[in-house]
Each structure stands twice: as C-alpha cells, then as structure tokens.
Image (cartoon, grey):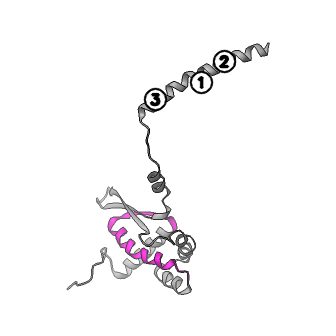
C-alpha cells in the first residue's frame, strides 16, 4: 500500500533523485532561473523552499543542514549572503514556475523555475501601464514635426546673414 507516499519519484532511484534535486537546487541558487520539465520543477520547489527558509537564520547548524542537502559550498555561500537578505521579509513562496510549452522531442511540458525576488522584468511590467492610445501618439508626432521644421528653417536663415 502507498499510504502517505505522495511525492513524485520522477522515474529514478532515491539516490539518483536526491543527487538530481541537489544539482538543480545549486543551479537555481547560482543562476536564479533554470529551464526544466514541470514535474521536476514541482519536485525542486518542495526541495529548495525549506532550504531558503533555513537560510534566513544564519547559524552554524543551519549552514550544515543546507550543505548536507546541496553539497556545494559556493551555492551555500550565495544562499546565505545574497538570497537570504532579499527574501528576509517574505513569509514563503520563494520560487515561481512559468510554463513555456512543450519540448520538441518528446512533447514534455517545459517551464522556467525562478526565484521570485530576482526577476526584474516581472516587477517592471507590473508597475508600468500603457494609458495612451496609438491615435494620440500619431497626432502629437505630426503636430511636433512642422514646428521642428519651421524652427530649423529660421535658424538657417538667421545664420546666413551672420556669415557674410
């Protein structure tokens, strides 16, 4: 019976799965965004979010626990020095999964998984709103063009007598 055994095995042995999730977590911490399949991204989210929560408290024990899962001292340093500072006020939900379509070879569903606080593009597009219409842009551009031509013509006529 499979009672209370809900995590995705991803078609791998336990050691292979742990090594793969550890490597993917290190890549996510170093690069802030990686491309993978949706199933692996969901498994990675469950693996990496407790580690990010653990990194908020910078103690020797928490560093040892995180290192035992990641096995990469550069990723641990990056996690505790930079990422934990950015996510200090966030109560959870440190990663975001954005689906990108299907892979060409085997039609697997692909996605980005990224750290939420490191995507500047999402923050910029949410704050910026386009309120002008196309028609108003054309009318202002055509109105400014004759004024610019007239001022350029006046400048050339004024410069010609000075040269003599």
Residue occupied by mark 3: 138
| Sequence-first tag of 1 and 3 | 3
Residue 116 shows which numbered tag?
A: none
Q: CA distance from mark 1 to mark 3?
A: 16 Å
| Sequence-first tag of 2 and 3 | 3
Q: Residue 136, position in %: x, y?
A: 44, 32
Would you identify the image quadrant in which residue 150 lies?
top right
Q: Is residue 131 above or below residue 97?
A: above
Quadrant of the snapshot with the C terminus: top right
Q: Which residues are magenta?
A: 30-58
Q: Residue 68, position in %: x, y?
A: 48, 83
SS under mark 2:
helix
- The crowd level at tag 2 (other Cα within 10 Å; few <14, some 14-19, many 20+) is few
Residue located at (46% from left, 32% from top): 137
Instruction: Based on the picture, tell me whether residue 47 belongs to the magenta stretch.
Output: yes
Q: Are marks 1 and 3 in contact (CB under 8 Å)?
A: no
Q: Residue 65, position in %: x, y?
A: 49, 84
Would you identify the image quadrant in which residue 92 lies?
bottom left
SS under mark 1:
helix
Q: Could you say which is closer to the camera, residue 60 or residue 70?
A: 60
Q: Could you say which is closer to the camera, residue 84 or residue 20?
A: 84
- The crowd level at tag 3 (other Cα within 10 Å; few <14, some 14-19, many 20+) is few
Q: CA distance from mark 2 to mark 1?
A: 10 Å
Residue occupied by mark 1: 148
Q: From the viewer's perspective, is 73 left or right of 94? A: right
């Amino acid at each position: 019976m499979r009672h209370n055994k809900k995590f995705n095995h991803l078609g791998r042995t336990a050691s292979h799965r742990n090594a793969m999730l550890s490597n993917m977590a290190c890549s996510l911490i170093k690069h802030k965004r990686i491309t993978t399949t949706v199933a692996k991204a969901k498994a990675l989210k469950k693996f990496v979010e407790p580690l990010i929560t653990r990194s908020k408290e910078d103690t020797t024990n928490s560093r040892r626990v995180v290192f035992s899962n990641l096995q990469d001292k550069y990723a641990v340093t990056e996690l505790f020095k930079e990422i934990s500072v950015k996510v200090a006020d966030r109560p959870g939900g440190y990663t975001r999964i954005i689906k990108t379509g299907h892979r060409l070879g085997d039609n697997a569903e692909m996605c980005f998984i990224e750290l939420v606080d490191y995507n500047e593009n999402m923050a910029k597009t949410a704050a910026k709103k386009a309120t002008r219409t196309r028609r108003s842009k054309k009318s202002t551009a055509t109105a400014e063009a004759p004024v610019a031509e007239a001022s350029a013509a006046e400048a050339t006529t004024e410069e010609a007598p000075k040269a003599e």
